[in-house]
Image: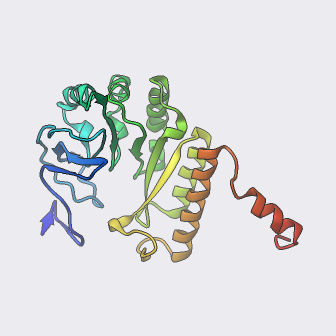
Amino acid sequence: MEVNNKKLNKPYSYGPYNKFNDTEQWIRITEGCPHNCEYCYEPKEYKVFGIPEIIRNDVSIMDMNFLCKPECYDILKELADKRVNSKVVYYKMICGFDFRFITEEIAVLMKEARFKKIRIAWDREYIQQFKLKDTIKNLIKVGYKPRNIQLFMICNWKIPYDICLKKLDLTKVWGVQVADCYFDGQVSPNIEPIHWTKEQIKDFRRRCRKHNQLVSFGIDPNARQVGEKHKQGELF
């Protein structure tokens, strides 16, 4: 199968989606994205399927670019009104939000719809830092804590390792978390080098894990282990 002239190497899900277990529900409300990125299999044509019946208080939304549709305003308002067993519903966006569409108005609606952690995709160039910084400011302004904002970075792709290190430096300044996502859907421990080396992949994963520990806890939870190694002379 081909989508936008891109050969699918791995299964990709299309169409409306609605599954659940005893505690959580997974849904897809819309489909399509205008950007046609070469590392993504989402079609350009967009569709709106509507919100299925919400039967869990924790809902994961699987849309690839939810905010690019004009209907997103009404959908966010509808999500905010949902209740299950007289209790509010909390949401998370699995694939992240496209920061290019996050205005202050949208940020308010996202907060009112109770998205607990905001995931944003920073897959492309370093120059996008200016718009990203404004987006993070908007999210903080409406009540999100920096540690509850997470930036996706595509790794092992054409954005070089050293540029991703620069991005990681900025996330330290902003105090937000990072999710290192690997090209073509590869997941650890089965990541094969494509545009990066094995050493770069391993090092970046290590740096991201440590970064998120520092952001989450405000301290290094491994400090005692480091101290013991110093005492034993292992770090000299």
Residue 3: horizontal and vertical position, in percent?
15, 62
- Residue 171 vs 111, above or below: the answer is below
Q: How many marks?
A: 0
Front residue of this view, candidates 178 and 85: 85
> Is 85 situated left or right of 163 in this image?
left
The N terminus sits in image quarter = bottom left
- Residue 180 vs 117, above or below: the answer is below
Front residue of this view, candidates 12 and 92: 92
> Is 193 situated left or right of 6 in this image?
right
- Residue 22 vs 226, above or below: the answer is above
Front residue of this view, candidates 196 and 22: 22
Residue 74: horizontal and vertical position, in percent?
19, 26
Residue 89: horizontal and vertical position, in percent?
31, 34
- Residue 143 vs 164, above or below: the answer is above
Quarter of the image for residue 77 reads: top left
Q: How is the image coloured?
A: rainbow
Quarter of the image for residue 69 reads: top left
Q: Residue at x 33, y 39 (%)?
A: 91
The C terminus sits in image quarter = bottom right
Q: Residue at x 61, y 41 (%)?
A: 173
Q: Residue at x 20, y 69 (%)?
A: 8
Residue 95: horizontal and vertical position, in percent?
32, 50
> Is 42 situated left or right of 169 in this image?
left
